[in-house]
Image: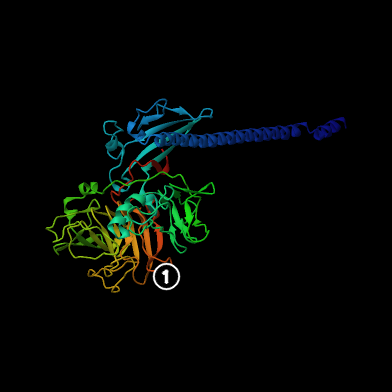
Amino acid sequence: MNLLRRHLHALREEQGFTMAPVVIAGMLISLVVAVSLSAAQGDLNLTRNDLDQKQAYEAGRAGLNDYAHHLNNDTNYWSLCTNVPQPSAVNQMGSTAKRRPVPGSTGSSYAIELLPANGQPSCSTANPTGSMIESGGDAAGTFRIRATGYAGDSKQSIVATFKRRSFLDYIYFTQLETSDPVTYGDPATIAGAYQQCTKTVAGGRYDAPIPGSPSGTYCSAIQFAANDQVKGPFHTNDSILTCGTPTIGSSPSDAIEMSAPVTRGGVQYGWTPVCGNYTPNLSSTPNLTAPVLTPPPTNAQLRFVAQSAYRYSCQVRIVLNGTTMTVTKSDGSSSTLPLPPNGVIHVANGTSACSPSPCSSAYSPYLASYSTSSACGNVYIRGTYSGKLTIAAQNDIVIAGTLARTGDGMLGLIADNFVRVYHPFAAQSARGNCEGGNNGSGLTGSTSPTRIDAAILAIQHSFIVDHFDCGASLGTLTVNGAISQKFRGAVGTGGSSSGTGYLKDYNYDPRLRYISPPYFLDPIEAAWKTQRETLDFP
């Protein structure tokens, strides 16, 4: 009996069974705690790494801002290579030895590397342009730097491309918002206009009549009308006149710049309403202290760029067809050839051997006619193109029909004098005296265009429509590209479909922010701007 009780008592004891679950539970709790601690430590590491990456990126941006600040204060800063005032973080490519701490930061720093032009080993003060400035392709005229930011164990590199401010930054650029002096007709008024009408509005252009004018003529108050649309970035070294509510700019990112604002009631404005107290429709807040941009005096440098087969003298007519062109010279000979390999054509003034009349007569929009030959370096241009091309003329370029691009085509038109829109009419004895109707001498195959796809630069004069004040409305002139001129050229009158000439539909080609027609001219002593920024991954 006692043996049986002891056996039953032993069966009721649980100490051997309870110990194992307790041990196992303890192990599981320890494992969970260990895993939780490891996860928390991993999160902390991820957070630290993420924070370091962000701080390194901001440090890289601080490096870019440092370099851009010095470049804005001295436009030749880039040409000093690494011989810049100290302290600096500027190194040759491949070195980040010289670094600077980020102001106000604890531990982050940056280094700047100069990235030489294609095929060059390093930046050289003996040849800064050749060693740093890209000379060909879409990157021509640019230089690059790399800014690397450091924070903790992280680093981030950003490559910035710098380019001088360009006329191609704008759909519309003028130095002076008034008519070209040659549009005033009589010689005395023209001579006086070169004195009075080369002033800005703020400088007193309309404060007095043109000196020497027999009739006391004032400078033309040319204006943007209610239906005008200038869709893209805008710059004038002057200020503008408006009638109604013209549209300038197409998005808040479009720069609208006036360099010589007027003051009314103690407040500065970039415009003056001339027919009612209207405010123009501006897509962004205008910059009224924009820097003045000035073109070089001529396009002569492009004659040395053009290859010998693409240098012409005297008047030529060019019909574009994709990647080829047909060129007709003053002597009547024609040839079809490919667009130039480097994309540049130059046409210079010739001698009387080209034509019985030497190139001496001044242009007037009221007297325009179209001879088949001339000693002047004129280019008549029309057609469709798919290649990249810049045409420079020592005298005028006449757009004698639609100029339309296909694909990635890009065209630049640079005239020392005028870029003109073909509109044949009988020669006038005075402005608005349009005798004989639309029967002016014309050229076979030429028509008044309604579409122009090109970047246009009239260095000394204007983009203008011949006989703009004669005949019925020509509809709307659509320009896709950019227009730059010294004086504002008239393209029509009346500001409506009942006027003469054209209404404007000007549209910026956004590709011009990054690429340009071959060897397109830049302003003199223009400031540098950041063209693009890209992350540089190892």
- Quarter of the rendering occupied by the C terminus: top left
Q: Which element carries disc 1, helix, strand or loop?
A: loop
Residue 385 percent across, percent down from the top left:
28, 61
Residue 405 visible to an observer of this rendering:
no
Based on the displayed image, in which of its 4 quarters is residue 500 positioned? bottom left
Based on the displayed image, in which of its 4 quarters is residue 357 positioned? bottom left
Q: Nearer the viewer, residue 495 or 7?
A: 495
113 is higher (above) or lower (below) than 356:
above
Q: Residue furthest left?
A: 353
How packed is label 1: few (under 14 Cα within 10 Å), some, or many (20 or more)?
Answer: some
Q: Nearer the viewer, residue 234 or 148?
A: 234
User: What is the image's colouring?
Assistant: rainbow
Q: Which residue shows up at 25% across the image and 57% down it?
A: 396
Q: Which residue shows up at 59% across the image and 36% down it?
A: 43
Residue 321 lies left or right of residue 488; in this view the side is: left
Residue 194 percent across, percent down from the top left:
32, 51
Question: Badge 1 is on which residue?
Answer: 497
Residue 295 visible to an observer of this rendering:
yes
Residue 5 percent across, percent down from the top left:
86, 32
Q: Nearer the viewer, residue 230 or 113?
A: 230
Based on the displayed image, in which of its 4 quarters is residue 524 positioned? top left
103 is higher (above) or lower (below) than 471:
above
Amino acid under disc 1: Ser
Residue 407 percent across, percent down from the top left:
33, 60
174 is higher (above) or lower (below) than 448:
above
